[in-house]
Image: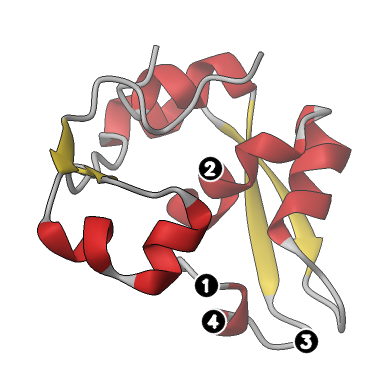
Amino acid sequence: MAITRYNERFIRTTNEDVYTYSPIFKKRGITSIENYSTAVLIYPSPEELAEITEITAVWGVGSKYFNLAKEYYDNEKYWWIIAWYNLRPLETDFKPGDVVKIPTPLETILTAFGIL
């Protein structure tokens, strides 16, 4: 199982009348919504960056974070590490030909980001 970026995040449950009386929510059986608190993003320190090896890949037409994560980490659920490490949260932040940095080893980067 992948380590999730939602670990140790506060979850707030909203039970509002709008969920009970709205036809859309009522039809789907939704009576409440769970909201995750905003994550505090910790970028690795220079010392931690020294322990990380970067693999570079070239962003192409049709490239996706989850495909890179599957290729380099054997798990597409770690796509967010590549986005976070490159400080580009969206795939549209890359243009074809841009260099993408993939941090390895996975355990080291998870520790540096404060996940492990």
Residue beneath the point at 24% across and 65% down: 21
Residue beneath the point at 12% across and 59% down: 17
Number of other residues with Cα within 10 Å of mark 3, as a class: few under 14, some 14 to 19, many 20 or more: few
Number of other residues with Cα within 10 Å of mark 1, as a class: few under 14, some 14 to 19, many 20 or more: few
Instruction: Residue 93: give its label.
Output: 4
Q: Is residue 86 visible?
A: no
CA–CA distance in space, label 4 to label 2: 15 Å
N-term mark: 3 or 2: 2
N-term mark: 4 or 2: 2
Number of other residues with Cα within 10 Å of mark 2, as a class: few under 14, some 14 to 19, many 20 or more: many
The amino acid on which the numbered mark 4 sits, given as a three-letter code, is Asp
Which residue, given by chain and number where applicable, does mark 1 sit on?
90
CA–CA distance in space, label 4 to label 1: 5 Å
Specify the quadrant of the image occupied by residue 61.
Answer: bottom right
The amino acid on which the numbered mark 1 sits, given as a three-letter code, is Leu
The tally of labels here is 4
Closer to the observer: label 3 or label 2? 2
The amino acid on which the numbered mark 2 sits, given as a three-letter code, is Ile
Which residue, given by chain and number where applicable, does mark 3 sit on?
96
Which residue, given by chain and number where applicable, does mark 2 sit on?
81
N-term mark: 1 or 3: 1
Q: Is disc 1 in contact with disc 3, using a CB cutoff of under 8 Å?
A: no
Residue beneath the point at 37% across and 31% down: 6
